[in-house]
Image (cartoon, rainbow, N blue to C red):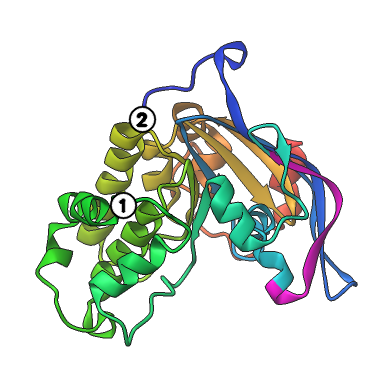
Amino acid sequence: MAEPAVKTEEKEIILSVNNIEVVYDEVILVLRGISLDVPKGELITLLGPNGAGKSTTLKAISGLLKTEDGKVTRGAISFKGESIANSSPDEIVRKGIFQVMEGRRIIEDMTVIENLRLGAYTRKDKFVKDDIEKVFHYFPRLKERTGLAGYLSGGEQQMLAIGRAIMARPEMILLDEPSMGLSPLLVKEVFGIIRSINKEQGITMLLVEQNANMALHSANYGYVMESGKIVLDGTGEELLNNEDMKEFYLAGGDTERKSFKNLKSYKRRKRWM
């Protein structure tokens, strides 16, 4: 498990999301006052059911809402003390945030090397080749793949997507469902590499993940979302030991309930609130 988060007063907050609301198509309210802090160098996870607003939260941070007719209508988002709520996606990448999208989004008709170089498009330095070798250090399998990226397996494509993020030399990476579609063995491998990158490179990470057990064993701190709101938060260890988390997300807990068929979600939100 990741090391527990340090006390609040000792943390340097690199990203702050303060009471934001997000609307799509000017009518659909998706986020209803989300607030969270991400300390520098830590791995923070954002959990919750499908449709809770997790991916929307990442897109609000990375500026990608604008590509889907969404916008932040209230609240503030700041990175290293500077407002980024109205910045374009490329401006946010240059400021130091890179998002690894759900579904990988690699360029299938480009090679592995070409995809990696694409990740470095905002850079002007001469160390791109060195960083490609750094990616191969974490993902040696990619070095063996010389053909088009479209022929990679699902796990290799996820590795390439994360490697492309490293190529941008970001201070923070947003990861959206990195385990999606992967076998349990590959999930374990990918999460091990994510933890290594976070620890060895000092890259801050905000992780959206359906595999709550794996995410909480990796994270310093976690937030749980339902229906566009944060309903629970705590260290990875605290959430792993929380009875509501065990019951609803970790397939356990001290309960005799054997079926969730007739369960109303507001019951657990009410307890958490």
Look at the image and say whether residue 68 sits in the magenta stretch.
Answer: yes
Q: Nearer the viewer, residue 72 or 137?
A: 137
Residue 190: which disc?
Answer: none
Q: Secondary structure at mark 2?
A: loop
Q: Nearer the viewer, residue 267 or 21?
A: 21
Amino acid at dot 2: Ala
Amino acid at dot 1: Lys
Instruction: Magenta stretch: give its range.
Output: 67-78
Q: Position of residue 73 (x, y in %)?
A: 87, 56
Q: Position of residue 40 (x, y in %)?
A: 51, 29
Q: Relative to 224, say whether 107 is above or below.
A: below
Instruction: Decide if residue 256 is in sight here.
Output: no
Q: Position of residue 201 (x, y in %)?
A: 32, 36
Q: Relative to 229, say whether 198 is above or below.
A: above
Magenta span main SS: strand
Look at the image and say whether residue 245 sits in the magenta stretch.
Answer: no
Q: Nearer the viewer, residue 207 or 67?
A: 67
Q: Return the residue at label 2.
A: 2
Q: Is 93 on the left-hand or right-hand side of 32? A: left
Which residue occupies 35% across, 71% down?
181
